[in-house]
Amino acid sequence: MDLPVKPDTRDRVVRLLGRRIIFPGEILMTGNGYLQLTLYLVVLLLLVKPLGTYMANVYEGRIRLINRFCLPFENLLYRLCRVKPAQEMHWTQYAVAMLIFNVLGALAVYALQRLQTYLPLNPQAFSAVSPDSSFNTAVSFATNTNWQGYGGETTMSYFTQMAALTVQNFLSAATGMAVLVALIRGFARQSAETIGNFWVDLTRTTLYILLPLAFIFSLVYVGQGMVQTFSTYQTVPLVQPVEYDNPKLDAAGQSVKDEKGNPVTEKAVAKEQVIALGPAASQIAIKQLGTNGGGFFNVNSAHPFENPTPLSNFLEVLSILLISAALCYTFGRMVGDTRQGWAVLAAMTIVFVAMLALCVGSEQSGNPLLAKQGVDQTASAMQAGGNMEGKETRFGVVNSALWATATTVASNGSVNSMHDSFTPLGGLVPMWDMQLGEVIFGGVGSGLYGMLIFAIVAVFVAGLMIGRTPEYLGKKLQAFEMKMSAVALLLVPLVILVGTAIAVLTDAGKAGVANPGAHGFSEILYAFSSVANNNGSAFAGLSANTVFYNTALGIAILLGRYWLAVPVLAIAGALAAKKKIPVSAGTLPTHTPLFVALLVGTVIIVGALAFFPVLALGPIVEHLIMVGVH
Amino acid sequence: MMDVIFIALMVGFFVLTIGLVYGFDRLLRRGS
C-alpha cells in the first residue's frame, strides 16, 4: 500500500532542531506518557524521606529492631572476621581496608570465571571464560560498573552468576555507600582523627539496607514472572520455521569474505529455539537497587524473563534511583540539617528532568528521514509513535527514554532498549548524563559523594566571587580539599578522552566498530564514558569482547572508581579534623534556590566544557547530517 | 601466562593506589 507523503515544508530552524513538521491534530506524546513520567517522579520523591531516614538510623545505630534481633548476628560476623567494630579508622586505614577488600573481591570473581568448568551449577557445561574477559568482568563487577563484554546466558554458569556477580552486586554497592558515609562523617564531625569503621559500614549497608530491599523486590519480580530456577535451558519447537542468513565460516572458524570484503552468508532455517533460564530474579533486584546494571541475560532488561511486565518495568526503573535519591535525605539527617539534603536532591532532580525531557522529546519526535518517506510516527491509540527502532514494543518510547535517562544519570547501566538505535540527540542524553560524572543521583553512594565534590567546587567559586574564604557545612575549604576535588573532577574526563583517542588511533580500537563515521565514533566515546564513570551501559554496535577493549576498558574502570574514591576519603579525613565554624553574615547559605542554581551551573559547565568538543564530533554532527544541514 | 599478566595488573593497580593513599596523606600532613 502506498503511504501518503506529507509535504516537506520545513524551514531552516526546524531542520536544525531536527523536528518533523507537526501537523494539526498530531499528537507527539499521549496523556498516558505524561502520566507515567509524573507518576514515576512522584513515587520516587515520596520514598526519599522514609528510606533516607531509615538509612540514617542504620548508620547511626538507632534502629531498635535491628539492635534487638540482628546485632548478635552482626557481632558474630565481626568475631569470625576478627573485626573490632568499636575501633574507628583514620582515613588512610579506611581507604586501605576498602582497597584490600575490593582487590580480593576482584580476584575471587576472576578465579570463579576461570574455574567455572570445575564448579557446580553449570548445566550448560560452559567452558572457562577467557583471561581478558575474566579480567574485564572481575574489575567491572567489583567496581559497581557491570560493563559486560560477554553475553550472560552464553558465557556464565549459574554458579558464576550467583557466587561471583550477584555477590559483587551487593558488595560493590555497599562499598560506594560506605565511602559516602565516611565523607558525611567528615562534614558532621569536628576535630576528629577518624571517619568510622569500613567493615562496620560495609556490613550494616549489606545486612540492613541492601539485603532486605533486594529480598522484597526479588519476591515481587518472581510474582511478575521473572525466572528463578536452576533448570537447564529448554529447547522448544518454533510455531513457524524462520529462514535467516548465516555467516559462512572457514576451517579456522573465521568469517569467509567475498572479493569486495563483504561477509559471505548461506541460507539456514531455524525450526527450534533454546530458551535460556536461570536464577535471574535474585540478581535483577540488587542489579537495580545497587545501581549495578549487569544483566543476567545479554539484552538485559529488554529480555522478557528479566523484565516481564509493565509493573516490573516500573519497579526496576524506580529502584535504579531509589537509594541514590534517598541518600540525599540521609546526608541531610547525618549533618544535622535536612535542608542541605533537599537542596542537593533538588539540583539532581532539575538536571534529571531536563535530560529526560530532551531524551523523550527527541525519541518521540521520531526520525525526520523516515517522516520524509511518509512513515507514520505519530503517537496514537494504535502505536507509541516516535522512533521505535531498538525499543521494546511493550514499553514504547516514553518508558524506554525514561529508563535510558535514569540508568545513565545513575551509574546503573541496565537497559530496556538499545541506546545505539536512539536518534542522535536522544543518544546524546545518556552519553552526556554519564559524562557529567554520574552525579545526578548517580551510583549508590558514589553519586552523592561526586555531587558533594561539585558542591565544594561551587562553594569555592562563590567564595572567590565575593572574596571570602569558602566554607561548606561549617567547614573551611582550603588548598588540600580543592586539590583533591580537582583530582576527582579532572581524572574521569582525562581517562575518557585519552582512552577514546587511543581507540580511534589504533587498528585494534577501530576493528570493533560496526558503523563508520560519526556514529562509530560515538560508539567508542560511549564505551569509555560508560566505564570510566562506572556506569556499564553499552551503546551496542561496538564489538568490545576483544583483548584490546577488555584490557583498555578494564583499566579505565579501575581508574574511574578508585582514583576518585581515594581523593574523596582524603577530603573526608581532612574535613573531620577541622573545627566547625559558626554561621555568620558572611556564610553562603547552601540550602537556598540560589545555591541549587549555582550547583546545577557548576555541574553543567564542567560537563559541557570537558565534553562539548568531543560530543560535536559524535552525536551532534550525526544529528546535523540526519536533518540535512551541510 | 595471560592469567599471570591480568592478576598482576589487578594487584599492581591496587598496590599503586594504596601508594596514592599515603601520598595524599603526606600532602595533607604537610598542610598543603
Image (cartoon, coloured by chain):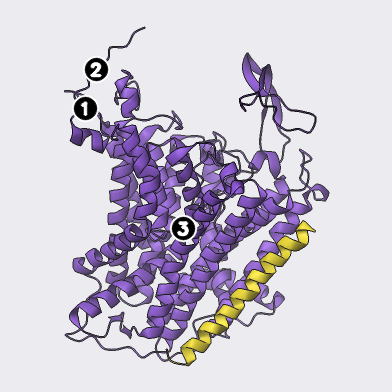
Chain colours: A purple, B yellow
Q: Which residue is mark 3?
A: A497
Disc 1 from disc 2: Cα separation: 9 Å
Residue A134: % across, % down: 69, 53
Q: Are marks 1 and 2 in contact (CB under 8 Å)?
A: yes
Tell me the amino acid under the disc marked 2.
Lys
Side of A590 relative to A222 (left or right):
left
Residue found at x 34% / y 8%: A2
Residue A595: % across, % down: 23, 69
Tell me the amino acid under the disc marked 3.
Leu
Q: Is residue A356 above or below residue A421?
A: below
Residue found at x 42% / y 59%: A438
Few, some or many C-alpha atoms within 10 Å of disc 1 (few <14, some 14-19, many ≥20)?
some
Considering every residue shown, the one lying at the far front of the view is: A259
Residue found at x 37% / y 36%: A423
Q: Secondary structure at mark 1?
A: loop
Disc 1 from disc 3: Cα separation: 37 Å
Q: Which residue is mark 2?
A: A6
Q: Nearer the viewer, mark 1 or mark 3?
A: 3
